[in-house]
Image (cartoon, rainbow, N blue to C red):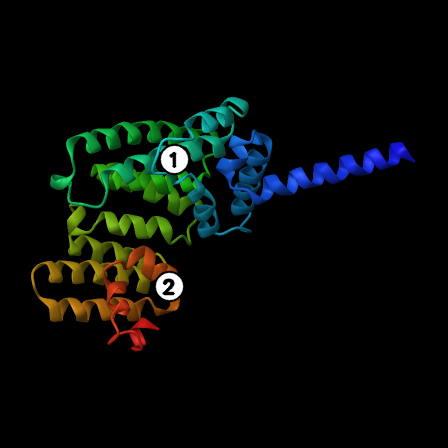
Amino acid sequence: MIKAFIIAIALVMSCAQSASAQSSSPLEQLSAGHVDATEDMFSRLQTKFEKGLASEYELLDAYKAFYQREDRYRAQLNMWIKSYPKSASAYLARGVYYRKLGEFRRGTSYIAQVPRENLSYMTQMFSLAKIDLEAALGLNPKSYLAMLHLLNIAQFEGDDRAADKYLAAGNAVLPSNFLVRARYLIHLTPRWGGSYRRMDSFIEECQSRGVAQDKIDLLNAIKRDDQGAVAGERGSTAQAQALYKEALLLARSAGPRFRRDYLGFSAGICSEPEHRSKEYCQ
């Protein structure tokens, strides 16, 4: 009887520890030494993605746990890789971590306004990130999120050749994708060294390849948002407002997440009382 009771208690404690590991964030799991649970969770997610059972957004959101502004978890991520040296997920996680450290330090200001030491730190972190993200791809050529993050880095570095490479790779792994195409389109905006002509050509190419119309509308919304921002910077307030409204209408089917992530300029008008009840803000 006592032995059965002890076994029951052990099972309860084991289940409690397992539930605790599952409910905590990946970095908390790693900090608590739950490396196996972390590896299992992310490898399972990748398998689901490759089987079409998890979306690109689910993949993206899972790795947002590694978006950190301060370099406080390098040791934990190193431990994950040491424990699982053949894990594409572990290298991807550390690559994402390095990339976001660099991006956060750079900030969103025009590059001429960014302190030199911040740019130097960004370059250092991006170099580390690229090594890990390429390692993830080497271990798993279907590591779609590694391609997306490498494309982000290519945008910041103005590397058109790399951007083309990771766009092609992302399209090959997930032909119906939106995230890689959206990031590539942003890479083509004038503020990143592109042009609206190049944006139009890319959107037309997507359409010719059979990309769904709702995604084409979202790509056009991203373009209108940028055009509105440029018009606003030039003092053409009325034109900017018209472009923002058009962007919001094109993106109505996508919901607030899309407006927050991709229409940062346009979404601002929906916080103004005179616009909140309008069709384009619903």
- Which residue lies at the image location 20% right of the left edge and 58% below the top edge? 226
Q: Residue 7, how many percent across, how many down?
A: 82, 34
Q: Give left or right: position of 136 versus 4.
A: left
In the image, 274 versus 153, the foreground residue is: 274
Furthest residue in direction left, as rendered: 235
Tell me, yes or no, whether the two marked residues, 1 and 2, touch with CB atoms within 8 Å: no
**Rendering quarter of residue 220:** bottom left
Q: Give left or right: position of 239 versus 185.
A: left
Q: Which residue is mark 1?
A: 97
Q: Which residue is mark 2?
A: 256
- Which residue lies at the image location 22% right of the left edge and 46% below the top edge? 108
- Can residue 194 be seen here? The reply is no
- Can residue 55 be seen here? The reply is yes
Earlier sequence position, callout 1 versus callout 2:
1
In the image, 262 versus 21, the foreground residue is: 21
Q: Amino acid at mark 1?
A: Tyr
Furthest residue in direction front, as rendered: 2
